Image: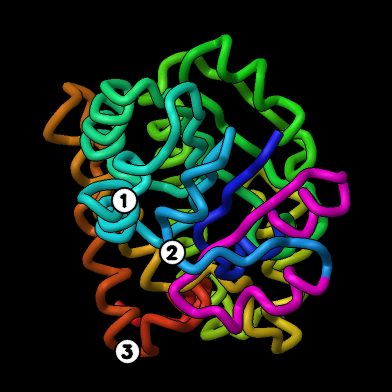
Amino acid sequence: MQIGFIGLGNMGSGMVANLLKKGFNVSVYDIQRDKAEALIAAGAVWRNSISEVSGDADVIMTSLPGPKQLESVMLGDAGVIAHGKSGAIWLDTGTNSIEIMVHISTLAGERQIDSIAAPVSGGAKGAETGTLSMFVGGNQESFDKIKGILEAIGSQIYYVGPLSHAILSKLLINYLCFINTKALGEVLSLGTEAGIDSKQLTNMIQAGSGSSWVAEKLLPSILEGNPGPAFTLNLAHKDACLVNELNKTFKTSLEFSERLSEVLQQACDTYGGDKSFTRMMNLKS
């Protein structure tokens, strides 16, 4: 099975490295060739364009920052859909707009390219260690065909049915993560102001009913001065805006989504969008 992989950022490079370790044949492309050097040394084959990397691939994988980049890669005369072969499977691992993913999937289907959405959770560390959580949606038969690929890069794989359900699941999980992060920042700030030791408060949060993945996995290292995960404020803001769009589609209201988008925009403006999303904890309302 020949894999063509597009997008070699913090997530994509780790995924490709693990695919190579598992013996898959992988060709790669990124707009910055230098990102591919270590992977080429490990056995990946460099391609000079999107058309080249997708033209002979049985599975075309994309790991891109957001909907704008995804449309640029997939659509148009130079895009994946125009050059992917009939019978190929497109596997996207990013967090994207449901509407845009469904639109691209429909166009791909017209060229006999099936689509699988598999947004991932676990950050750059999870990509590096092959321990990502993956929320997978799309045709069951195609899922079965590429399951070995998913198992090479993830340790927890959840098949949820339709393509849209995979994206929705990831957006809702990120929504919870960001709200937990902001709330923790407020709690620690108030506790510190009152004179409570932040490390002791963290231990008590972890032991109590207010604990969360953020409190247990991220907070201790952040308090020790570590910068936090490589997942940036820009990406978090993009995801929060996608969450906010869900209020236009569903009757159930996500009451904090609009404010969350505003908070993350403010954090981008204050600290820089390239900083870790956990910097939103330092933001003062």
Disc 3 or 1, which lies upstream in sequence? 1
Image location (x, y in percent) of residue 47:
55, 64
Query: Which quadrant: the N terminus?
Result: top right
Q: Which residues are magenta?
A: 16-41
Other residues around mark 2 within 10 Å, as few (<14) / some (14–19) / many (≥20): some
Q: CA distance from mark 3 to mark 1?
A: 36 Å
Q: Which mark is residue 270?
A: 3
Q: Which mark is residue 79?
A: 1
Q: Amino acid at mark 1?
A: Gly
Q: Nearer the viewer, mark 3 or mark 2?
A: 2
Q: CA distance from mark 1 to mark 2?
A: 9 Å
Other residues around mark 1 within 10 Å, as few (<14) / some (14–19) / many (≥20): some
In-image side of 153 versus 169 (left or right): right
Q: Is residue 135 magenta?
A: no
Residue 266 visible in this rendered orientation of the protein: yes
Disc 1 or 2, which lies upstream in sequence? 2
Q: Nearer the viewer, mark 3 or mark 1?
A: 1
Task: Look at mark 2 in the image and give the residue it sits on.
Answer: 49
